Amino acid sequence: LATFLGTLQLPPNPHRNPDGSLTEAALRGQTVFRSKKAGCSLCHVGDLLTDGQIHDVGQGSPRDYYEGYNTPSLLGVHRRVALLHHGKAKSLEEVLTEYHKPADVAGEGELTAEEQSDLIEYLKSL
């Protein structure tokens, strides 16, 4: 069964060029993703885009059993309908403007509208 599952191919990502390469906006977004200003690559690293660590991202509740959250992989994030540990964010835009703002994560200032748009295009391409 494991061998068979290893042969399955994911469907093509609709947010990439027909040849599978990144769009121009996604390439710019990749630069933003890796920048100190956005801070994404501090936790979302490696082939699976996760460091496998637990982080306190300031969204806990006194009722939480555990402190902090595992860094989720961002692979296939464009297919998710609910984002973050609580599922309250319904879009990447909402994640980056309300619940997990790069300025709060990295402390390097707000992203410009263009940087945010390009970052979202990159995230959708993963």
Image: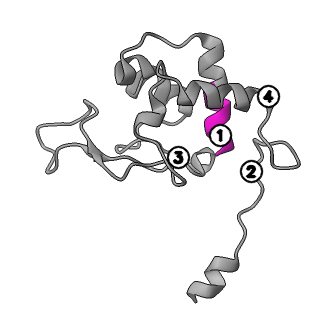
| Category of crowding for the residue at label 4, using alpha-carbon neighbours closer than 10 angstroms: few (below 14), some (14–19), many (at least 20) | some
Q: Which residue is mark 4?
A: 24
The residue depicted at 62 percent of the width and 50 percent of the height is: 79
Whole-angstrom CA distance, mark 3 to mark 1, is: 9 Å
How would you rate the neighbour count of disc 3 (Cα within 10 Å): few for under 14, some for 14-19, many for 20 or more?
Answer: some
Residue beneath label 3, please?
74
Is 46 placed above or below 2 here? above
Mark 4 or 1: the one toward you: 4
Earlier-in-chain disc, 3 versus 1: 3
Q: Please tell me whether residue 29 is drawn above or below residue 1 in the rendered image.
A: above
Left or right placement of residue 38 versus residue 1 in this view: left
- Asked if residue 56 is positioned above or below residue 98 in the image, the reply reads below
Mark 2 and mark 3 lie on one chain; the one further toward the N terminus is 2
In 3D space, how far apart are the residues under numbered discs 2 and 1 (Cα atoms)?
Answer: 8 Å
Task: Work out whether mark 4 precedes mark 1 in sequence or the reverse, and give the earlier one.
Answer: 4
Of the residues shown, which amino acid type is indicated by label 3?
A: Leu
- The one nearer the camera, 62 or 122, is 122
Q: Which residue sits furthest left?
A: 62
Nearer to me, 13 or 33: 33
Q: Give the magenta part as a residue range.
A: 119-126
Q: Which mark is residue 92?
A: none
Q: x, y (%) of residue 107?
A: 36, 16
Give the SS element for disc 3. Answer: loop
Work out whether mark 4 precedes mark 2 in sequence or the reverse, and give the earlier one: 2
Give residue 64's position: percent from left, percent from top.
Answer: 16, 45
Real-space Cα distance between discs 4 and 2?
Answer: 15 Å
Name the disc covering residue 124, or none. 1
User: Is residue 125 part of the magenta span, yes or no?
Assistant: yes
Question: Is the Cβ of the residue at disc 3 closer than 8 Å to that at disc 1?
Answer: no
Q: Do tag 2 and tag 3 residues touch (Cβ < 8 Å)?
A: no
Q: Amino acid at mark 1?
A: Lys
* Residue position for label 2: 13
